[in-house]
Image (tube, helix red, strand yellow):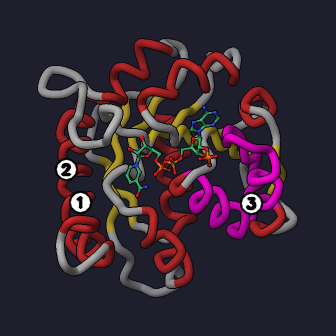
Amino acid sequence: MMQIGILGSGLMGGKLGTVLARAGHDVVFSYARNKEKLTRLAREAGAKARAGTPAEAARDADAILLSVHWSRFDDVLDQAGNLAGKTILTCSLPMNEDNTALVVGNTSSGAEELAKKVPKAKIVSAFNTIPSEVIPGVFAARRKKSRPSLVYCGDDSPGKKIAAQLISDVGFDPVDAGPLRIARYLEPMALLMGQLAYEGKEGPELAYRFERF
Ligand SMILES: NC(=O)c1ccc[n+]([C@@H]2O[C@H](COP(=O)([O-])OP(=O)(O)OC[C@H]3O[C@@H](n4cnc5c(N)ncnc54)[C@H](OP(=O)(O)O)[C@@H]3O)[C@@H](O)[C@H]2O)c1
């Protein structure tokens, strides 16, 4: 079991933190606009979860989940403090203010830009290709033989091992897509998933099935 620090406790951070706490990890929820929300999330996630500041979430974390809007990166990283040596899973996409376009692409990715901001951390890109709505259902079905695949990428082997474990604990079959630069392909793919989930007619489940395919 690991200690997980959640930096950004919204749709993704809230759901992933909740299922990881229910899977038995110690989870600290941090970074929301009010402390009451973090406390409520922790209460609902069960005895293994608590609310804290970004610095508290990061301090003893074996893995950090970064799940904030691109525009909040610098603020949350400042508040988290020294992240040298930490494994950071990022599901955050480098989106513009109204979430209509990637602001990094082709020759780099949000994950690679993050690695430049925290050069001594182990960055893994994961969980950004799924709509947050499917997470509880995947967790509920995690003991079934056939699990949906979830791709991740990164440059650090121990960091990727941690990521694969957590992906598996959420209920997915982890698929190693290669080095961190592959996030250049994963991030646009994540936009396609979002398009199918939220603009298409069939909702988030379609994106989930599509990823498995
Ligand atoms: N949602 C998805 O299905 C999905 C799928 C793939 C990738 N992603 C990516 O994952 C990342 C997170 O997405 P999300 O949907 O989870 O976003 P979200 O629900 O808006 O969560 C962001 C978190 O940041 C907090 N926050 C924002 N501004 C803040 C401020 N000034 N001070 C303190 N906290 C602040 C929010 O607080 P409040 O809770 O108080 O609002 C919230 O907890 C994004 O980069 C997105 O592109 C999301």
The magenta segment is 13-42
Q: How far apart are marks 2 and 1 (CA)?
A: 6 Å
Label 1 secondary element: helix
Looking at this view, name the residue that lies furthest to the right: 47
Question: 10 Å neighbourhood of mark 1: few (<14), some, or many (≥20)?
Answer: many
Asked whether the residues under the numbered discs 3 and 1 touch, taking CB atoms below 8 Å apart as contact, a structural biologist would say: no
Q: Is residue 28 magenta?
A: yes
Label 2 sits on residue: 189
Residue type, numbered disc 2: Met
Secondary structure, mark 3, is: helix
Q: Residue 16 sits in which quadrant? A: bottom right
Residue at 47% over, 76% down: 138
Q: How far apart are marks 3 and 1 (CA)?
A: 26 Å
Residue at the image position 42 percent from the left and 39 percent from the top: 92
15 on left or right of 111 = right
Q: Which residue is drawn at 61% across and 26% down?
A: 76
Q: Do the residues labelled 3 and 2 touch (CB within 8 Å)?
A: no
Image coordinates of residue 210 in percent, x first then y, are 20, 71
Q: Disc 2, disc 1: CB below 8 Å?
A: yes
Q: In the rendered image of this protein, does residue 181 appear above or below residue 189?
A: above
Q: What residue type is labelled 3?
A: Leu
Q: Is mark 1 within 8 Å of ligand 1?
A: yes
Is residue 111 visible in this depiction of the protein? yes
Decide whether residue 34 is among the magenta residues.
yes
* N-terminal label among 3 and 2: 3
Mark 2 lies on a secondary structure that is helix
Q: Position of residue 45 (x, y in %)?
A: 75, 66
- Sequence-first tag of 3 and 1: 3
**Residue picked out by circle 1:** 193
Quadrant where the N terminus sits is bottom right
Please state which of residues 148 and 203 is positioned toward the viewer in this rendering.
203
Q: Which mark is residue 41?
A: 3
